């Protein structure tokens, strides 16, 4: 990063992180909508563009899909917000407790989950089986606010969930991007014969989620930070998670050579204060809700305060859905002095090596059993 970019990032991060909250206990249909009118006008950079540059985060405890019990409610009540964010505070308190140096290994099944801790986060981090403690995780500490409203979901469909896909004759489920540690059983016919069969996350090629997008979504685990850098002809969005960088070409044309690069083919243009990005040619490995071949993702980035960046995305695939749908949230500027760090994905990581080594050990054991079978039958 050059000196001018560093200075710009520090200036953008100088204001407080949070805007005043307007907690509203209301129930209303959640349909996609245009950005609300705002009196804020983003400063212009040296190219005359609205300045989106800086370091941002989309970490939040609000999930993309709304909890089923909330129905069509777009906004949490103040009491619900206090409860949800209180759980995070308890997690931090438990995670900050000193470890007992005299304690032995946990019993089979691990230690009990501490009271007031989200089970999925505790187990997802390896909690009671010797994995990450809370200090290693950054799943977000607050409900996502959009225009000051504490949202129940990122999706803005009426029920806050992805619409049902059309039934397409002969179509098979299309896998999306795999996670960082999953991938099926260990056997000679499974995804362990070669490293190329493992997920893109396992191989440290792409994020363990949809951080880089499109659409860009926090992974609920850690490293949900971004840097935006603008030039006259392009906008680069650098993702901390696994070092991904997506380049948006301004005022260009989509490629027609059939190549589907990672993150797709992103073309952007300015509409007043808003950067509009349309992405096509998305590869199958980055399918979203089973869509990739005919998928178009339209994203909008609008700076609505010195420390908030409003983000909207629209999903369009007429072969799978009758109408476009999508979601929205707000990036928050990282506090002064914080920035995107290096993500040394494989440094000190034995997981992939051990996964493949374990599979080879099982192959050898199976071969030994097969060789001994004729002799045992003869007896």
Image (tube, rainbow, N blue to C red):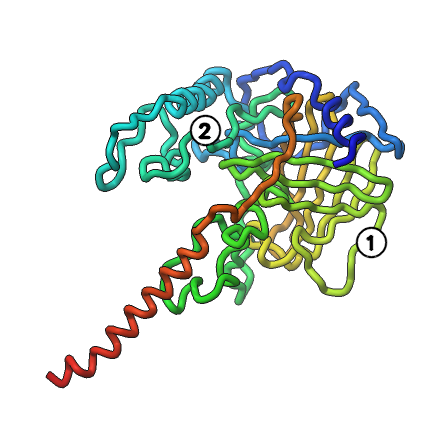
Residue 135: numbered disc: 2
Q: Choose between 355 and 39: the one closer to the eye.
A: 355
Q: Does 358 appear above or below 124?
A: below
In which quadrant will I find the C terminus? Answer: bottom left
Question: Is 254 placed left or right of 138 in the picture?
Answer: right
Would you call the spot at circle 1 few (<14 residues within 10 Å), some (14-19), or many (20 or more)?
few
How many marks the image carries: the answer is 2
Give the alpha-carbon distance from disc 2 to disc 1, as whole Å: 44 Å
Q: Quadrant of the N terminus?
A: top right
Where does label 1 land, which residue?
Answer: 253
Q: Position of residue 238 (x, y in %)?
A: 68, 41
- Which quadrant would residue 30 be assigned to in this image? top right
Other residues around mark 2 within 10 Å, as few (<14) / some (14–19) / many (≥20): few
Q: Residue at x 61, y 39 (%)?
A: 342
Residue 346: where, in percent of width, then height? 52, 49
| Residue 329 in which image quadrant | top right
Residue 176 shows in this picture: no
Q: Is residue 240 visible?
A: yes
Give the farthest residue toward the left. 379
184, above or below 330, in the image = below
Residue 93 versus residue 368 in the image, above or below = above
Q: Residue at the spot x=49%, y=61% of the render?
A: 195
Residue 315 badge: none
Q: Is residue 182 left or right of residue 209?
A: left
Instruction: Say which residue appears at 60% left-offset and 15% top-offset.
Output: 21
Q: Residue furthest bottom?
A: 378
User: Between disc 2 and disc 1, whose residue precedes?
Assistant: 2
* Secondary structure at numbered mark 2: helix
Q: Position of residue 5 (x, y in %)?
A: 77, 32
Question: In this image, 355 relative to 51: left or right?
Answer: left
């Amino acid at each position: 990063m050059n000196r001018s970019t560093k200075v710009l990032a520090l200036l953008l991060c100088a204001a407080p992180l949070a805007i005043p909250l307007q907690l509203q206990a209301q129930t209303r249909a959640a349909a996609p909508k245009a950005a609300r009118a705002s009196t804020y006008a983003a400063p212009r950079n040296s190219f005359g563009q609205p300045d989106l540059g800086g370091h941002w985060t989309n970490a939040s405890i609000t999930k993309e899909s709304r909890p089923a019990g909330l129905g069509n409610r777009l906004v949490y009540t103040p009491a619900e917000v206090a409860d949800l964010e209180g759980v995070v505070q308890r997690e931090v308190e438990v995670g900050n407790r000193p470890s007992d140096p005299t304690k032995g290994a946990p019993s089979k099944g691990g230690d009990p989950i501490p009271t007031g801790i989200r089970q999925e986060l505790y187990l997802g981090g390896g909690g009671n089986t010797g994995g990450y403690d809370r200090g290693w995780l950054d799943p977000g500490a607050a409900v996502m606010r959009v225009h000051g409203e504490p949202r129940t979901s990122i999706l803005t469909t009426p029920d806050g969930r992805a619409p049902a896909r059309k039934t397409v004759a002969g179509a098979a489920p299309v896998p999306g991007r795999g996670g960082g540690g999953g991938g099926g059983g260990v056997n000679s016919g499974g995804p362990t014969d070669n490293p190329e069969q493992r997920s893109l996350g396992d191989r440290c090629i792409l994020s363990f989620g949809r951080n880089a997008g499109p659409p860009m979504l926090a992974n609920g685990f850690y490293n949900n930070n971004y840097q935006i850098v603008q030039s006259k002809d392009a906008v680069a969005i650098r993702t901390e998670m696994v070092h991904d960088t997506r380049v948006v070409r301004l005022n260009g044309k989509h490629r027609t050579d059939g190549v589907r690069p990672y993150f797709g083919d992103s073309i952007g243009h300015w509409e007043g204060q808003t950067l509009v990005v349309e992405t096509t040619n998305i590869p199958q490995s980055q399918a979203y809700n089973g869509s990739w071949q005919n998928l178009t993702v339209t994203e909008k980035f609008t700076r609505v305060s010195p420390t908030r960046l409003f983000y909207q995305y629209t999903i369009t695939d007429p072969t799978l859905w009758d109408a476009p749908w999508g979601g929205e949230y707000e990036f928050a500027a990282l506090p002064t002095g914080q920035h995107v760090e290096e993500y040394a994905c494989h440094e000190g990581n034995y997981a992939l090596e051990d996964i493949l080594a374990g599979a080879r050990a099982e192959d050898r054991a199976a071969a030994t059993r097969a060789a001994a079978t004729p002799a045992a039958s003869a007896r």
